[in-house]
Image (cartoon, grey):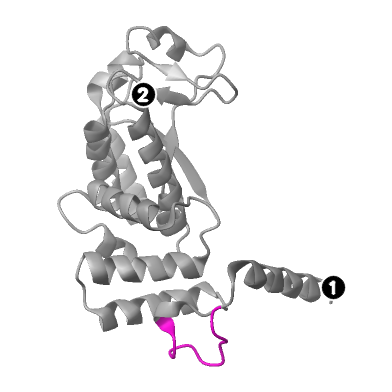
Amino acid sequence: MLQFEVGIQTFNPEVQQAISRRQDNAKTCENLAWLVNHSHAHLHTDLIFGLPGETLASFAEGFDRLYALRPHEIQLGLLKRLRGTPIARHSVVHGMTYDAEPPYTVRQTAVVDAPTVERFTRLARYWDLVANSGRFPQTLPVLLAGPSPFNAFLAFADWLWQRTGQTSRLTPEKLLDSLFDYLTGVIGMDKESVRQTLLAEYQASGARANPACLQGLLKDREKPVARLARALAQRQDRHGANSG
């Protein structure tokens, strides 16, 4: 498997100029489109939030532009102030503050306050679980439908945080049930259509539990059990398989 790591960081020309990054955006998009359509390479691209002068709105525009090219993965990261890097010279001018401990992650800038940074951090985590995991290839385009895929996912991320208060320990089953509730309860999509799509994706993922929204559709599955008990049983099963 050939994988290309493509560091986009930002599509904002003003931000690129501020950080002395030379990037021909049009040529970058042209090359990415060619790789997607004419090669077998797996494209792992990245965008960085918290760069000097980058607002949430301008980041959303860059995300939408990159997503339209359909790379296999889009990694969303927060800016980190690595020792010895030129980014430190922007701290005062752009009102940038960082965590006091390594890896010195940005906490806020002059155009992005701390709550927005926290909001983005949650979104990035959920993006990994839903999009980069590859578990929801049919559901993801539906979830991102609309004029701005980024803002569509941001709305879902805000809803998921309010619903669960978690960015970790979200099992595939809990995530799948949350997607079902959001698409049917918030977006208003047809329940049976969403259920059948999620059923196909859940079966293709190889997961072996029994999500609430798929009750009666998975044969020979027990009813959902408590998360800790289920995790213990799965761990024991893995050890049993490895001992053979």
Residue in view at x 34 percent, y 71 percent: 180
Q: Quadrant of residue 25?
A: top left
Residue 131 % position (x, y): 40, 56
Left or right side of 24 for 244:
right
Between marks 1 and 2, how big is the CA–CA gap? 49 Å
Q: Quadrant of residue 87?
A: top left
Q: Is residue 114 magenta?
A: no
Kindly identify which residue carries mark 1.
243
Q: Amino acid at mark 1?
A: Ser
Nearer the N terminus, badge 1 or badge 2? 2
Q: How many numbered badges does the structure rendering display?
A: 2
Does 119 sit above or below residue 217?
Answer: above
Left or right side of 43 for 147:
left
Q: Is residue 217 magenta?
A: yes
The quarter in which the N terminus is drawn is bottom right
Note whether residue 75 is visible: no
Residue 40 % position (x, y): 44, 56
Does 48 sit above or below residue 205?
Answer: above
Q: Quadrant of residue 130?
A: bottom left
* Residues rendered magenta in the picture: 214-224
Numbered badge on residue 49? none
Residue in view at x 51 percent, y 48 percent: 3
Secondary structure under tag 1 reads helix
Which one is nearer the viewer's eye here, 156 or 201?
A: 156
